[in-house]
């Protein structure tokens, strides 16, 4: 099933400056694996050495943060949208 992945500006150099890409995957993990096959270097920016989502990266399935549910095992359906959102630190 086709999933659209929204790529944030800091990661676009890894996707030939595409703001959205389409991948196949039944779960978020499968979609991330497909992203890494299509765009080398992207997986390392999203996942740590243990294969967990990096703490400064948020992934949303449609409008839902995957951390609030099944995480990388979150099921995907055709037409779903994954949005990668790097955490922003700041303030005083």
Image (spheres, rainbow, N blue to C red):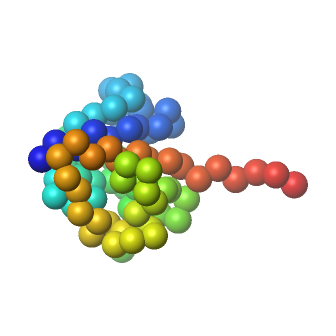
Residue at 22% over, 42% down: 79
Residue at 43% over, 57% down: 64
Q: For residue 22, which quarter of the picture?
A: top left
Q: Is residue 86 above or below residue 53?
A: above
In depth, the one of 6 and 37 nearer the eye is: 6
Q: Is residue 59 left or right of residue 31?
A: right
Q: Is residue 89 above or below residue 55?
A: above
Residue at the far left: name it.
1
Q: Is residue 1 visible?
A: yes
Residue at 53% over, 65% down: 55
- Residue 40 is situated, as x and y percent measured from the top left of the image, at 27, 44
Residue at 12% over, 47% down: 1
Q: Is residue 77 left or right of residue 81?
A: left
Q: For residue 49, which quarter of the picture?
A: bottom left
**Which of the image's four quarters has the C terminus?**
bottom right
* Count of numbered circles in the view: 0
- Residue 9 is situated, as x and y percent measured from the top left of the image, at 49, 33
Q: Is residue 29 visible?
A: no
Q: For residue 68, which quarter of the picture?
A: bottom left
Residue at the far top: name it.
17
Q: Is residue 39 left or right of residue 90?
A: left
- Residue 46 is situated, as x and y percent measured from the top left of the image, at 40, 55
- Residue 5 is situated, as x and y percent measured from the top left of the image, at 32, 41
In depth, the one of 84 and 38 nearer the eye is: 84
């Amino acid at each position: 099933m086709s999933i659209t992945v929204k790529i944030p500006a800091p990661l676009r150099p890894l996707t030939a400056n595409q703001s959205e890409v389409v991948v196949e995957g039944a779960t978020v993990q499968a979609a991330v694996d497909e992203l890494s096959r299509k765009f080398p270097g992207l997986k390392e920016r999203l996942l740590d050495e243990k294969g967990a989502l990096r703490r400064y990266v948020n992934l949303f399935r449609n409008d839902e943060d995957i951390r609030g549910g099944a995480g990388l095992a979150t099921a995907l359906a055709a037409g779903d949208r994954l949005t990668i959102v790097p955490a922003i630190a700041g303030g005083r």
